[in-house]
C-alpha cells in the first residue's frame, strides 16, 4: 500500500542513506557533483510532496455562500436514481472495490457513523464561478484503509449515477490526493443532507482541485492500476473532452 506518508518516509530514508553513504566519495571532485545532484533531487521531491499535501484554505461560518449553485447534472434522470430519491436514499449503497483486499458496500448509515471531518472550503468551477460551503463526511483515506489497497493500486476511480450527453460521469485521482486530509466523501452541505442539486446522497470533495473533479451522485470508489480502459481513457468525463486530468488549485 502506497500512502503519501510512507512514500515520503521512503524518500527521506533514501535521501539520508544516499547522503551518509556518499560522504567520503563526496570529497573528490566528481563525487561532489553527484552528491549535490542527489541532494537537489531529494529537496525537489520533498518540496513537491509538501506542496501536494498542503491544505486548501478553510473559511469561517460567516463566509458560507447563502446559495450553493448546482452545475452539470442537477437532477439525475435515471429511473433507478429517481426511485432512490423517492425513498430518501435509504437503500443507497456505496461500493468500495477494485484492487482492494476487502471490498465493501456501505449504507449512508455506515458512512455517517464513521469519524467525520467538517470543512468550509471554496469550490472553483472552470466555468468562472465559486461558492463557499461547509462539507461533512469521512475522509476517503479511512475507507481506503478499511478496504486495504493492494500494492498494484495507483489511482482511485469515482463512479457516478448520472449521465451527461449519454455518457456516464466519472472521475479519478492519484493516491496523494486520495490520502489528502481534506479529501472526504461528503453526505452533508451546510449541516443538512446534500441537496439533489449538489450530488445527493454522496459526493466527493477534493479540495486541492477544480470543481469538475468533485464527483457527485457517487455509487462506487474503485482502486485501479491504470485509467486506460475506463471511459475514454483520460480519467474523467471532462478529461475525455480535453480538460486537464490534474486540475490543481
Ligand atoms: N456526477 C457528476 N459530478 C459532477 C458534475 C456532474 O455533472 N455530474 N459536474 C462537476 C462540475 S463541472 C462542478 S463545477 C461540480 C458542481 O458541483 P455543484 O453542483 O455542487 O455546484 O460538480 C462536478 N461533479
Ligand atoms: Mo465545473
Image (cartoon, helix red, strand yellow):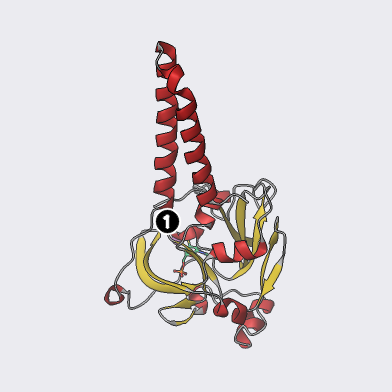
Q: Secondary structure at mark 1?
A: loop
Task: Between residue 25 and residue 197, name the one nearer to us.
Answer: 25
Say above or below: 149 vs 202. above
Q: Is mark 1 within 8 Å of ligand 1?
A: no
Instruction: From the top left corner, tell me how far across and down residue 231 is, in percent.
Output: 66, 53
Q: Is residue 185 left or right of residue 38?
A: right
Q: Label 1: few (<14), some or many (≥20) within 10 Å?
A: many
Residue at the (55%, 62%) spot, across then down = 141
Residue at the (43%, 23%) spot, across then down = 23
Q: Residue 89's quadrant in the figure?
A: bottom right
Q: Can you name the residue that lies furthest to the bottom here? A: 87
Q: Which residue is mark 1?
A: 208
Instruction: From the top left corner, tell me how far across and down residue 8 is, in percent.
Output: 49, 45
Task: Between residue 170 and residue 182, name the one nearer to us.
Answer: 182
Q: Can you name the residue that lies furthest to the left here? A: 62
Task: Between residue 81 and residue 24, name the one nearer to us.
Answer: 24
Residue at the (70%, 58%) spot, across then down = 100
Instruction: From the top left corner, tell me how far across and down residue 55 is, in percent.
Output: 38, 57
Say above or below: 194 vs 103. below
Residue at the (41%, 29%) spot, across then down = 39
Q: Is residue 133 left or right of residue 227?
A: left
Say above or below: 76 vs 159. below
How many callouts does the rendering have?
A: 1
Instruction: From the top left corner, tell me how far across and down residue 226 is, in percent.
Output: 66, 46
Say above or below: 172 vs 38. below
Amino acid at each position: 500500500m502506497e500512502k503519501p506518508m510512507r512514500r515520503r518516509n521512503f524518500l527521506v530514508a533514501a535521501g539520508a542513506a544516499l547522503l551518509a553513504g556518499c560522504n567520503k566519495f563526496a570529497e573528490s571532485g566528481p563525487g561532489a557533483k553527484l552528491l549535490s545532484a542527489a541532494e537537489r533531487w531529494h529537496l525537489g521531491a520533498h518540496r513537491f510532496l509538501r506542496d501536494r499535501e498542503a491544505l486548501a484554505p478553510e473559511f469561517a461560518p460567516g463566509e458560507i455562500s447563502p446559495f450553493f449553485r448546482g452545475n452539470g447534472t442537477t437532477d439525475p434522470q435515471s429511473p433507478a436514481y429517481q426511485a432512490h430519491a423517492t425513498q430518501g436514499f435509504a437503500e443507497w449503497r456505496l461500493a468500495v472495490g477494485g484492487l482492494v483486499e476487502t471490498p465493501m458496500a456501505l449504507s449512508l448509515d455506515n458512512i455517517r457513523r464513521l469519524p467525520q471531518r467538517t470543512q468550509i472550503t471554496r469550490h472553483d468551477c472552470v466555468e468562472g464561478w465559486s461558492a463557499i460551503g461547509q462539507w461533512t463526511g469521512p475522509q476517503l483515506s479511512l475507507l481506503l484503509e478499511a478496504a486495504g489497497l493492494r500494492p498494484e493500486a495507483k489511482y482511485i476511480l469515482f463512479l457516478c449515477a448520472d449521465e451527461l450527453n449519454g455518457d456516464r460521469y466519472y472521475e479519478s485521482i492519484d493516491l496523494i490526493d486520495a490520502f489528502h486530509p481534506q479529501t472526504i466523501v461528503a453526505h452533508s452541505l451546510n449541516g443538512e443532507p446534500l441537496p439533489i442539486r449538489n450530488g445527493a446522497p454522496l459526493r466527493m470533495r477534493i479540495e486541492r482541485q477544480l470543481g469538475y473533479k468533485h464527483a457527485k451522485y457517487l455509487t462506487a470508489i474503485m482502486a485501479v492500476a491504470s485509467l486506460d480502459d475506463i471511459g475514454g481513457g483520460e480519467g474523467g468525463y471532462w478529461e475525455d473532452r480535453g480538460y486537464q486530468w490534474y486540475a490543481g488549485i
